[in-house]
Image: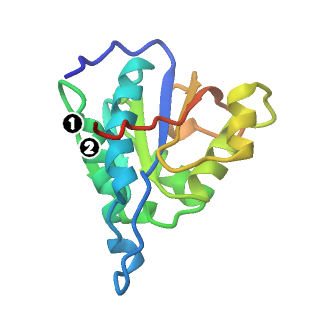
Amino acid sequence: MIARAEAGPARRLVVLRHAKSAWPLGVADHERPLAPRGLRDAPAAGRAHAEARCLPDLTLCSTAVRARRTGELAAAQWDTAPPLRLDGRLYGADVPELLAVVREVPDAVRTLLLIGHNPGLEELVLELAGDGRGDALDDVRTKFPTSAVAILDWHGADWGELAPGAALLTDMLVPRGRVPD
């Protein structure tokens, strides 16, 4: 298990796209499970959070099976999992909907993990980071694949102030799990 790191002075939004999902016949989109690769990558995403020193105080997660399972497998890598709140508004959400959910987060939360879906998450990261430059931003502009983790820092007094262009994208990670020997 990995211990929780102390959060820095800035607020941090960690955006995690759900791990690779399966497409079983006859299963509704909301109920799709993780594919074998997703089952390997989701724990790797949890380890990447710890290595990047961005363990959350709260996780907001889509109600879709693949997002919930990603969150469970990632959090299993930490000594103490943060509270997890499922929010149906995150399923298929666009940027205004995602921002509305984030802006409701209590002020006591310094690091927030948001687990959901594309294209909304990718568009949220790009909108919050604004016209910035850097390798991480270029990577997101190219592709925000399954299990991708975007780390955004900003110095707002509370989550209700989070606005387009207000954050700095400090890192973009694409953790991949090992195939068992």
Of 34 and 134, the residue lying toward us: 34
Q: Quadrant of the N terminus?
A: top left
Where is residue 144 shown, x and y percent of the image?
A: 61, 47
The residue beneath circle 1 is 76
Q: Write the residue at 49% across / 27% down.
A: 12
Q: Residues within 10 Å of mark 2 (few under 14, many from 20)?
A: many
Q: Write the residue at 34% across / 55% down.
A: 36
Q: Residues within 10 Å of mark 1 (few under 14, many from 20)?
A: some
Instruction: Tell me if residue 16 comes above or below residue 168 in the rendering.
Output: below
Where is residue 11 shown, x and y percent of the image?
A: 49, 24
Residue 86 can be seen in this image: no
Of 163 and 59, the residue lying toward us: 59
Asked which quadrant contains residue 155, the reply is top right
Q: Secondary structure at mark 2?
A: helix
User: Of all residues shown, which one is farthest toward the bottom?
Assistant: 26
Instruction: Tell me if residue 125 comes above or below residue 3 in the rendering.
Output: below
The residue beneath circle 2 is 73
Where is residue 122 shown, x and y percent of the image?
A: 62, 49
Question: Would residue 60 be found to the left or right of residue 173 on screen?
Answer: left
Q: Amino acid at mark 2?
A: Leu
Q: CA distance from mark 2 to mark 1?
A: 5 Å
| Disc 2 to disc 1: CB gap under 8 Å | yes
Q: Which mark is residue 86?
A: none
Question: Would residue 124 be found to the left or right of residue 71 on screen?
Answer: right
Q: Write the residue at 71% across / 33% down.
A: 137
Q: Quadrant of the C terminus?
A: top left
Q: Amino acid at mark 1?
A: Ala
Asked which quadrant contains residue 41, the reply is top left
Q: Secondary structure at mark 1?
A: loop
